[in-house]
Structure formats: structure tokens, C-alpha cells
Image: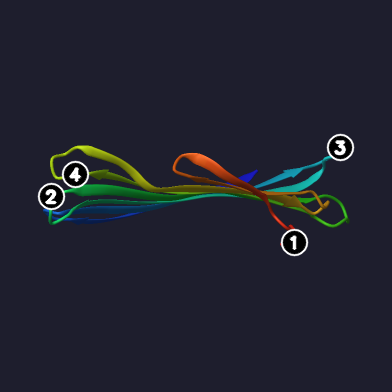
Amino acid sequence: MNQTIDFLSKQEFKVNTTTDIQNAQQSSTVDSRVTTHGGHDAGVVEKHFSYPLAIDYSFIVNSDGSFYQTVTSDQQDLVREVRSAGDGPALVSNERNEVNGTDTLNWDASGNFLGPTGSKTTQTYRLHDARGYCFDRRLTAEAQKLISVTDGPVCDD
């Protein structure tokens, strides 16, 4: 077995009396290669896992004293597997699970919570392999309510 793991984290800050903006990007990856000998599962399995994450946070004070906080995120789970055995073609599968979300919380100048606005979340899940299996679905929510479930047209990549 051979395996490598990488991690990257980047953060940006912009802070003053009326603004607090923080943006963070992280990426974790794992690459592995396993070789087995003998038996019906003999061969090589290579896997690539990737977990990118981006979070943007803003806290803004308006000139009238009201303020709001907005958070946006993009989180992914990506997996690619290549299975090679004997002289036949390699079996490849790709999996992608991604969630994007944004929401804004609002307060008046007296500090009274006014509620959320602009809340939207999407999740896209896609899995397909060399044998022809394919699953592709997207969920969309607004204002904390599911508004659509959409199946993808074709898995051709």
C-alpha cells in the first residue's frame, strides 16, 4: 500500500469598526494505491479523495446602525477510483457530493433580530462508473424549505 495525504488552509481577514470579513479555504486530499496478489480480486486499486471547503463570513454594520451577517459555504466530497485487474480494461468510478449554502441574518439598530433573508442551499450528488451505473440528483432549498428535486439528464463524463 502506498498513500499520500495533503492539507492546505488559507484564511483572509478584513476587520475594521464596521466590517468583519473572514474567508477560509481548505483542501484535504488523499491518494492511495493498493496492490493485491492472488485470488479473484488480484490487481491494483487507486483512489483519490478530495475534500475542498470554502467559507465566506461577513458581518457588516450599516450607517443607520442596523447590521447583518452573511455566511456562504461550498463543501465537496470527491472520490475517484480506478480498479485494474489482469488484461481487461480498468474500471473507473467517480463520485461527487457538493453542498452550497448561503444565509443572511439581520438586526435593527437596537439589536432586535429581524430574521433571515436570502437563505438558499443546493446539494448535488453524482455517482457513475465504467459499468454504466449512474445516479445524478440535485436538491434545492430556499428559506429552509425543500423546493425542488431534480434528476440529472445524462452521466457522460
Q: Which residue is mark 4?
A: 108
Residues at circles 4 and 2 in contact by the CB criterion of under 8 Å: yes
Colouring scheme applied when the structure was drawn: rainbow
> For the point 54% across and 41% down, which residue is it?
146
**What distance separates the C-alpha of mark 3 from that of mark 1?**
32 Å
Q: Return the x and y of residue 123 as percentages of the image width and height.
A: 56, 47
- The amino acid at mark 4 is Asp
Q: Earlier in the sequence, mark 2 or mark 1?
A: 2
Indicate which disc residue 65 carries. Answer: 2
* Spatial CA span between label 3 and label 4: 69 Å
C-alpha gap between disc 3 and disc 2: 71 Å
| Residue 78 drawn at (x, y percent) | 59, 50
User: Can residue 5 be seen?
Assistant: no
Give coordinates of residue 133: x percent, y percent.
79, 49
At label 1, the amino acid type is: Asp
Earlier sequence position, callout 4 versus callout 2: 2
* Residue type highlighted by circle 3: Gly
* Mark number, residue 156: 1
Q: What amino acid is found at the position of numbered circle 2 in the picture? A: Gly
Residue at image location 32% in from the left, 54% down from the top: 23
Mark 1 and mark 4 lie on one chain; the one further toward the N terminus is 4
The mark closer to the camera, 3 or 1, is 1
- Residue 31, placed above or below residue 115: below
Q: In this image, 128 relative to 40: left or right?
A: left
The residue pinned by badge 3 equals 39
Task: Name the residue rendered at 25%, 48% in the picture.
Answer: 68
Q: Secondary structure at mark 2?
A: loop
